[in-house]
Each structure stands twice: as structure tokens, then as C-alpha cells.
Image (cartoon, grey):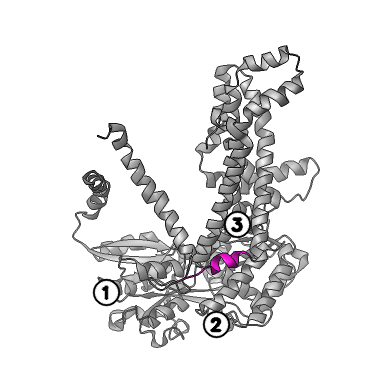
Amino acid sequence: MKKILLILAVLCLPLMLGGCASDDRAVLNVYNWGDYMDPAIIAQFEKEYNCRVNYETYTSNEDMYVKVKNSSDTYDVLVPSDYMIERLIKEDMLRLINKENITNLANIDSTALNLPFDPGNQYSIPYFYGVLGIIYNTDLVTDPVDSWNILWNDKYASKILMYDSIRDSMGVSLSRLGFSMNETNEANINAARDALIAQKPLVMAYVTDNVKNLMATKDAAMAVVYSGDASIIISDNDSLAFAVPKEGSNAFYDNFVIPKNAQNPELAEKFINYMLTPEVAAKNVEYVGYSTPVTQAVGLLDESWQKNSAFNISKEDLARCEIFKDLPSDILEIYNRAWTEVNVSK
Amino acid sequence: MKTFKEYIAYPYGLWMIIFIAVPLLVVIWFSFLSNPDFKMGEYTFTLDNYKEFLDPVYLELLYRSFVYAVIATLISFMIAYPLGNLIVSLPEHRQNLMIVLMILPMWVNFLLRTYAWMVLLSGSGLVVKFLGLLGFTDATLLYTQSAVILGMVYNFFPYMLLPIYTSLKKIDPDLLRAATDLGANHFQMFVKVKFPLSLPGIVSGCMMVFMPAVSTFVISNLLGGGKYMLIGNLIEQQFLTANNWNFGSAISMVLMTIIFLVLGIARLIAGKEIDTGGQIL
């Protein structure tokens, strides 16, 4: 038994050594989406505020939620999306933000404020927003791209890329049939499923990350993508354009929040405020590609960004979009099942 | 009094407990629970996860995964067996060189190699351009069933070749000579002597290709473009996007059980000879 303990102790040694780094600067623990902040900006913040930013990333709201809820690690800043913010508020996991410390809030576009998931922005401060839409090659697509119906047009068979995600692909199909992207009626969800199964022979692939390459080589004529990815792809390629279908689409808002158990909330507020400085926000856009709610930042970007239709989403387009709701698990079960049937179908 | 040998086994035992036994028990435990809102401490025991799997949609998926894996295994075998024979017939130093060349691609990360195939097979890739020169215009290769099977064969082929090569190499050439001396023609010698003696290597090779092929999700995702879902993708989806770890665990258990059954059958086929060498399992 003693031997086992000894071995355990030896195995744990590196962990203990790693824990005591000799650095007395204040530490800010940030938990953000992967590839969602220019690392140069974080380094700049560390320098200006003489602190150390401990930066970790996640790939989905759910991953973040599970980790924050169940792990003993504490974070000072999180960047959840709309529906997840709603859930975190409901479960009393967030701290009220002292808006006196967020002086740059005056720079924020009012369309990104006061949204239903956090009325009055008591708990969350906008970071980026974006919409789901269609990126298409103007050399290959001759018809006007203004509706999800174009994804069902057999003229473009094997040149259509769909988005490999349950809520997004189901949402496209629901929206095309005139239903809400947050549909809870089983018959309507199944109608959307059947439409996706009928569409499958026309689809080249369901992807999330290879869009840029396939669009650039003209292997694909159009793809369902989020505006931030689209804006980066368009910025390298003049023959590509982005459209938000007339039926409406999904819009998301990713906001900064401070969890209740944050160790360093004052520094967290400084960090949030810093990110909303126009110069910093503009620099961040060039890295991330999504639309920034910091109005003065847009003017600081060069002309190609100003003309980029996936970056400058019009107010009308945005108004047609729905925000995803946190659906109850029995409804999500129906979505999962429908999507699996689409996946299995030939 | 314990020997030094026994003490030296402790770290391995500990390692296996932490990284194999415990995770496996967790998966078994999860597969019998229902925990819809994913909260710690709130769960009930149920068999529903297993019942759910009996749905035709999922069974069809299981069937499809098996068909793909069997095809990939057969193709690998058909390439590896003649190649193994060829390599064994070479002089010793050339044999080693050939084996190193066969294993060489495995020094490059599996994902990178699969991404490379995505580029090669895409519409503007080399393979399609070459086929275009031969007159096959508009060939689509990427995101097809064939691409998925190609990916499986390419990635798992060395696991077929190595055990076959080892078992062929172990065959005493005198036995083959004796067979011909005693009047067997080349074909009879192969069917009655060489093939049975290499069977353990073949069975090992088939298992080594079949097991990763039946459970892969990366290859079907990258080369199939999400259009040819396999059972591995379903498990991945349950864990990563559907957030139903309980159902995901149940499918994993079903798959594991079936693989064990196949493994058992394979051992029966190979009979006692499996103990005579060439095997990795």
C-alpha cells in the first residue's frame, strides 16, 4: 500500500510543481470560444494592466456550461451566446455588472443592447454578433440568392454545402417552410426533416470547416455559413458574396458575462471595457470577422471591410432574424432524432 | 516474498486501472442512467438507452458500418496478402527496407494524411485532374462512399500487412519444399500448407483493420462530408452535439460487445494455430 502511495505521490509531483509559478501579477481567467479573440490584444491588455490573462477556449456553449457548472476551476470572464446567457441568469450563476466601470458602453450600437435574454444588460455586455446566411460564388450562381429555396435547386446539385450542425441545418429547413427556427411542434419539425432528406442528393457535403477551400476552388457554388466565417472568406475573394434569405435566419449575440464565483471581478470589468475600445475592437474584427457592436470601430477598418456584406449586416436583415432559444430537452430529443434520420438517409 | 518482477508490474497495473478500467466502468455506468438535463447527482436507472438503440434507424447505421468495415478489410487483405508474399520472397535487407517504406506514412499524423486525401480527391485535386487527362471528366471522388472506404483502406492497411508478413516469414521453407516433393502442385501447396499456416496472421490483420474501421468517425466525416454517417459518428454526435452521454455510452457498449463477439469468432476460425505466431492480438 505504501508503495502505491509513493508512486501516486511521484506521479503528482509535476502537477504540484506546475502550480507554483513565481508571478505576483493579478490573474484574470478568461474562458472564450476558440479562435475568437486576437491573441495580440490579450498580450496588450496584460501589459497595460500589469496582469496575467489565463486564456482557455471551448467549442460550444454546452461544453462551457458543463465545465463552469461542474468543475472546480473558476473563471472571471465568459463569452456565452444569447440562449446560454438566459440559462445562466435563470440558474443564478452570473454577477451583476457594474456599468459605471464599463465606460465604453456608450460606444455600443443599440441594436445589440436590451435583448430579450438579458433586458437592460444587467448581466451581459455585447462582444460580437452574427447571422446564418448563404455565401455564394457569383460566377457560378446565376439566379438571385434571396431565399433558402436556392439550396433545394437541382441546378446546383453536388455544389451545395450545408452546415453540419443540428440546430442550424434544421433551422434552415424550418425557416424555408415558414416555421420558426425554434419550432416546438413535432409535425413541423418532421416536415423540416423530410425536406432535408429530399435535399440530401443535391448536397455535396455537410461541413463546418472546409468551406473556405471548397468555395475558393469553385468545387462548391454555395454554402450555409455564419457571417463571421463568410466575411473572412469574402475578404480574400472578390467573386464571393453573402446573403441573408428573405424567410429570415438565425442571429446570435455573444456577450461577456462575469460568473458569480469570479475571483477578480474588478479586473474582469476592466477587461470587458478594454475590449470595447474602438481601436481594440477594430483590430479584433480583422482577426475574428464577426460584426462588432462597437460603432466607432467600423469606421477605423479599411474599405474592403466596409463593403463586406457579411460584416456589415443591414438592420433590415437583422430584424428578420430569430435568436435561438434554449429548447427543453424533450424537444431537443426530437431535433436530434430528426437530424440522425437525415444523416442516415441515402 | 514478492519478486522484483512483480513490483515492476505495479505502475502498469495502476496505469491500466486509471486509463482503461475506470473509464470503461464509467461508460457502463452512464449507459444505464437517464440524466436529461445533465446535472450532477440527478439521475435514474433505466434500460431505455439500450431499448432506444433497437430502433431501425440505428440498426441500419450499425449494419452500414459493418458493411463498410468488411469491404475495407477485404480490400486491405487482397492488397496485403500478395504484397506480403512478394516481400517475403525478397532478400533479407530488401525486406526490411520494404517494410519500413510501408510503415513510413504512419510517421505522419493520421489526421494530416486524411486531410491530404481531401485535397487530392477534391475537384481541383491531382487525382481528378489525372482522370480528366484519361478522358474521365467531371469525376467526383471527394465526399463519396468510395472515398470513405479508400480512407479506411489507406489508413489501416499497414495493420493488415504487418501480421501477414510476420506469419508468412515464420513459415519454415522446408515445409513448402516437402509439400512439393510429396507431389503437391503449386496451387495445392498454397491451399493445403501455406495458407493455413499464415491464417493466424490473416485473422490478426483482419481484426486490426476491422476494429478501427467499424468505429471510425473521422474518416467518414472528412472524406464522406457527413453524408455517410457511421456508428462512430453517432457516438461522437451523442457526446459532442446532442449532449446525450447516456445514449452515447449505450451505443459504445453495444459496439464493444459486438466487436468482442467478432473477436471470439475469429479466434475460433483460426483455431489453435493462432497461438503459433504472427498474431498481434
Q: Is residue A242 visible?
A: no
Q: Residue at x 19, y 54 (%)?
A: A22
Q: Do the residues labelled 1 and 2 touch (CB within 8 Å)?
A: no
Q: What residue is at 53 percent from the left and 57 percent from the top?
A: B252
Left or right: residue B203 versus residue A58 is: right
> Given the image, what chain letter belongs to the residue carrying mark 3?
B
Name the residue type under label 1: Pro
Instruction: Name the residue beneath numbered marker 1.
Output: A265
A24 versus B90 height, above or below: below
Is residue B276 inside the magenta stretch? no
Q: Dot 3, how many residues are within 10 Å of its Cα: few (below 14), some (14-19), or many (20+)? A: many
Quarter of the view holding residue B74: top right
**Secondary-structure class at tag 3:** helix
Q: What residue type is labelled 2?
A: Lys
Residue position for label 3? B231
Tell me which residue sits at (58%, 63%) in the image. A234
